[in-house]
Amino acid sequence: MKISVIGCGRWGSFITWYLCRTGHQLTLYGREGSKNMERFMRERKNDYLTLPESVTLTCSLKQALESEIIVISIGSQQLDSLCAQIEEHGAQGKIFVLCMKGLETGTCRRLSQITQSHFDESCHTAVWLGPGHVQEFVRGIPNCMVIDSAHEPTKRRLIELFSSDLIRFYYGADLIGNELGAAAKNVIGIAAGMLDGYGLVTLKGALMSRGTREIARLIKAMGGNELSAYGLCHLGDYEATVFSEHSQNRRFGELYTRGESFDKLAEGYYTAQALHQLAAEARVELPICETVYHILYESANAKREMDALFSRSLKQEF
């Protein structure tokens, strides 16, 4: 199967490596001038992996779109712009697989809603979500992930094509819940990093329990299945997001408490803003996500806000 991956960052390059490993013909697209792509062109490697010679490297979006399956792994806030560019080349009959976790700021659209707004009914969108870090996958450490789509045949086809001994895929059954849960777990990851920064690691158990509960409420309010919050898209991804040294959202939160800058992508930063707006519109209480929002966007004192979060009024757990 000819598959193209759009996005040559850490995750996009891993997906290229992984799908090549499972026997497919891969093309990796990166923007002209991208430092990641320039290095791949020179050395065929980055800090995590080396791409096989069989992988085609290109800076031509038109060439990348020659494949039937297009996997997208870019910053979530750039998806709308990318889809507009794809439209210019024509996208009839394509399958788009979104491997990002986020919500569009301003509109609060889920990422599958963005693609659906650009492409006709001949195209189908799926999401590839769940736990795992590149650093562990390339060492042969397996994990479980989920693929979901509103189009059942597309979901089943992708799982058959993508499954291997390294990643076990589950069939998603709730696109709304899976996308919201995956996006929100990055905000919980930032909160976890802030706890690390203040030496409050033992509170992570409470953070995970209450974080899952508030996201379940949001998913239900938005028309999804609240149980999705307890699946691979959210709770199942907590170890990789809340504890792992490789988690960029956790690291961002930790460095924030120290007043240090973070030069990598932390999707939870943008998702916190979108969730703040979404919670107001849906009239759902999201105390952890709101705390992160107040800290990041309203310059609230991080230590005081985190203390206040865990000293809220007493109430029933459920």
Image (tube, rainbow, N blue to C red):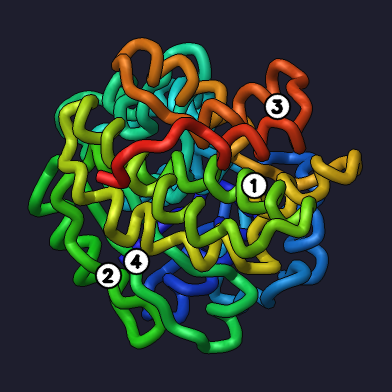
Task: Answer with mark 2 or mark 3, whichever residue precedes in sequence.
Answer: 2
Q: Amino acid at mark 2?
A: Phe
Say few, some or many: other residues with alpha carbon within 10 Å of mark 2 (under 14 / 14 to 19 / 20 or more).
many
* Label 2 vs label 3, nearer the camera: 3
The image quadrant of residue 218 is top left
The dot on residue 30 is: 1
Are dots 1 and 4 in contact, CB under 8 Å? no
- The first of marks 1 and 4 along the sequence is 1
- Dot 4 corresponds to which residue? 145
Name the amino acid type tagged 3.
Answer: Leu
- Residue 318 in view in this figure: yes
Q: Are marks 2 and 4 in contact (CB under 8 Å)?
A: yes
Position of 109 relative to 281 (above/below): below
Contact between labelled residues 3 and 2, with CB atoms less than 8 Å apart = no
Real-space Cα distance between discs 2 and 3?
A: 34 Å
- Residue 239 in picture, x, y percent from top left: 51, 67
* Label 1 to label 4: alpha-carbon separation: 25 Å
Which residue matches tag 3?
296
Total marks shown come to 4
Asked where in the image residue 272 lies, by quadrant, the reply is top right
How far apart marks 2 and 4 lie (CA) works out to: 5 Å
Mark 2 element type: strand
Q: First in sequence, mark 1 or 2: give its number.
A: 1
Q: Which mark is residue 38?
A: none
Dot placed on the residue nearer the N-terminal end, 4 or 3? 4
| Residue behind mark 2 | 169
* Residue nearest the observer in this picture, 2 or 306: 306
Categorize mark 3 by other alpha carbons within 10 Å: few (<14), some (14-19), many (20+): some
Left or right: residue 219 compared with residue 54: left
Is disc 1 surrounded by few (<14), some (14 to 19) or many (20+) residues within 10 Å? many
Instruction: Select label 4 or label 3 by which is in front.
Output: 3
| Quadrant into which the C terminus falls | top left
